[in-house]
Structures are given as C-alpha cells and as structure tokens.
Image (cartoon, rainbow, N blue to C red):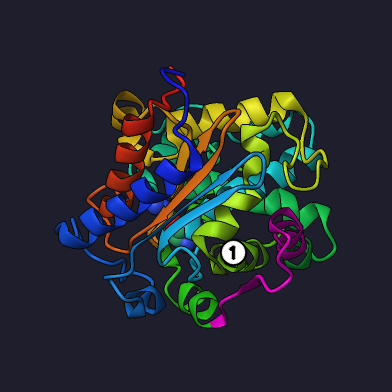
Amino acid sequence: MEGTPQQPKNCSSLLEELVAEARKASPGGQVADYIPALAQVDADCVGIAVVELDGTVHTAGDANVPFSIQSISKIFGLALAMDRMDDTLWERVRMEPSGQAFNSIVQLEWEHGIPRNPFINAGAIVVADVLTSRYSSSKTAFVQYVRQLCSNEAIHADHDVWNSEKEHGNRNAALAYLMKSFGNIDSSVPEVLDHYFFQCSIAMSCVDLARSLGFLANKGIQPGTQQRVCDARSAHRINALLSTSGMYDQSGEFAFTVGLPAKSGVGGGIIAVVPDYGVICAWSPPLNRFGNPARAVEMITQFALRLGLSVY
Ligand code: DON
C-alpha cells in the first residue's frame, strides 16, 4: 500500500465529499434497460459505504438503500463453487481476461465452450451449473450464504427483477445452450438460468455488500464473526480474478488508475477490496460503455487515490 488509510473521522467526511461531487457530476451513461425492471431505478441515487475489518462503518448518501446486485453476485457464486469443487473447476472456466463485453458470445465457440473467466456471463453460468448440480436447492443455499455473510436475514431476491431477467434473458440462454452443446453444462439449461437470474436479482445495500465481502480483505476470514469463509489461497485467487476481470473490458484501466480488486454490476454497484483494511461499495445506476457505473467508478477511484490504497 502507498499510504496509511486516514482516520475514521476524515474517512466519513471524504465520503460525504465524494457523494456531493458525484451528485454534481454528469451521469456518465444510461441506466441499464436491457433488463426492463432495472430501468425503473432512480438514476440519481448515489451512495457509498466503507466497512473496515474492525467493523467500523462509514457511509454517505444512499448507502443503506438496497439495489440489484447483478454481477456482483458472481463473487458469491464463485466462492461457493470453489468451496464445493476441487481444482477441476478451472478446466471448465479459465482465469484470463476476455477482452470482450461481459455478455459476448464470439469467443465461446472458438474456445470450445470454455469461458475465459468466472465474471463474464458465460463463466458465471458455468459456476451456476456447478451450484445447481451440487445443491438440492441452490437458490436457497445461495441466499442463505449471502445472509450469513452480511448478518442480515432480510436479504432476498427481487422477484420483479428476477422475472424480468427470465423474460429478457435470450443472450444468456444462447451462452448456456452453446456451452451445453460443448458438454460444459451438466444440469438442464432452464434450471441453470433460473439460478443465475435469481442470484443476479438479489437486492443489497452498499453497507450489506461491503460487510459481506470482508473475508476477501482478510485472507478468507469474515471479520465480523471470525468464521473462515474460504482458505487464504481461495481469497487470493478471487482477488486476482477481480483485479484482472472484475471490471470487464475496463479492468486494465481500473488496475492502472486505482489498483484494487473490484467488481461491478449493471444495477450500478461496485465493490472494491482493500486487503487488510476493508471493503468499499459505491452505487450509482447509470452505466458507461463498458457496463460499469460511471459515477461509482469515479467515487471509488477518488477514495483510493486520496487515501493511497493501491495494492501495487
Ligand atoms: O446477465 C446479465 O446480463 C445480468 N444479470 C448481469 C450482468 C452484469 O451485471 C454485468 N456487470 N456489469
């Protein structure tokens, strides 16, 4: 790390400043509407939360308002699948950046139905297949896992978003059927997609998300409960994948300017892991051309730069 994080008081006032700047800034893009239910979200919402390893929480703006976690759910799915499966998982999904959009299909045929990484949609659908074939009720197991991680029993899937994704999920269905044709999906495609859409439609606030992912900043141990979520090697691997692929085709730029493992979702959220310090989550629905939330990217960038948090 380039510097020592500021004291809590300064941290909270910095968050207030970042939210005020974000509210004045241009939206930087459009709210996702390819899933119609997501288009209902108020584009002006802006929130940020930081949860430190000692449990200290700093918030500003709409940090306690639940939103659709979308692709951020791919982190929980991957952690669960790595827990359930040995290293043969990496024969079904690789650990390389894709250089393509998150929902691209072009590479998948050339590469014989093996997705580049677990954070593009195709990779997360393989992970969803691992979960559906290893749990009798993967959706229940998933939501319980998330509830336990953030100590919030109220966490649930938003059924409007879930149904909307099911009705407009042709691209994901195409990815899943193509992978099935290569033998890389075991369960039935509708069952796998149902799980995948369910996990994407879970609603959480910035505080919930930052709290739930503390184990990634703490070598696999959840700071609040001191329970081991995964081994240190798995935490390292998830952080490495977040660094190279978590921000899709903007991952290189994000590493270059910010230098933190991070994951975005088309609901407008981003989480960033600061090893040995805590987790930041920012939310602002409008998305840039990479499918990343522009004002949330900027808030996390400024937070990391001003506190000197880069891991490099
Ligand atoms: O499958 C989809 O397209 C969405 N449920 C999730 C995509 C997503 O969040 C990409 N993130 N920036």
Along the viewing direction, whichever of 16 and 113 lies nearer the viewer: 16
Q: Quadrant of residue 187?
A: bottom right
Q: Is residue 121 above or below residue 192?
A: above
Q: Which residues are magenta?
A: 142-159
Q: Is residue 8 above or below residue 238?
A: below
Whether residue 46 sits left or right of residue 229 in the image: it is: left
Q: Does the magenta portion include 221?
A: no
Residue at 31% from the left image edge and 24% from the top image edge: 256
Q: Is residue 240 above or below residue 35?
A: above
Whether residue 125 sits left or right of residue 144 in the image: it is: left
Callout 1: helix, strand or loop?
Answer: helix
Q: Is residue 293 visible?
A: no
Ligand 1 resides in the quarter of the picture at bottom left
Residue at 16% from the left image edge and 56% from the top image edge: 25
Residue at 41% from the left image edge and 67% from the top image edge: 62
Q: Does the magenta portion include 149?
A: yes
> What percent of the width, then of the height, locates residue 306?
32, 32
- The crowd level at tag 1 (other Cα within 10 Å; few <14, some 14-19, many 20+) is many
**Amino acid type of the residue that numbered disc 1 sits on in the rendered structure:** Leu
Whether residue 245 sits left or right of residue 295 in the image: it is: right
> What percent of the width, then of the height, locates residue 279?
54, 42
Q: Is residue 131 visible?
A: yes
Q: Quadrant of residue 246?
A: top left
> What percent of the width, then of the height, locates residue 297?
31, 46
Residue that numbered label 1 is attached to: 193
Residue at 50% from the left image edge and 82% from the top image edge: 160
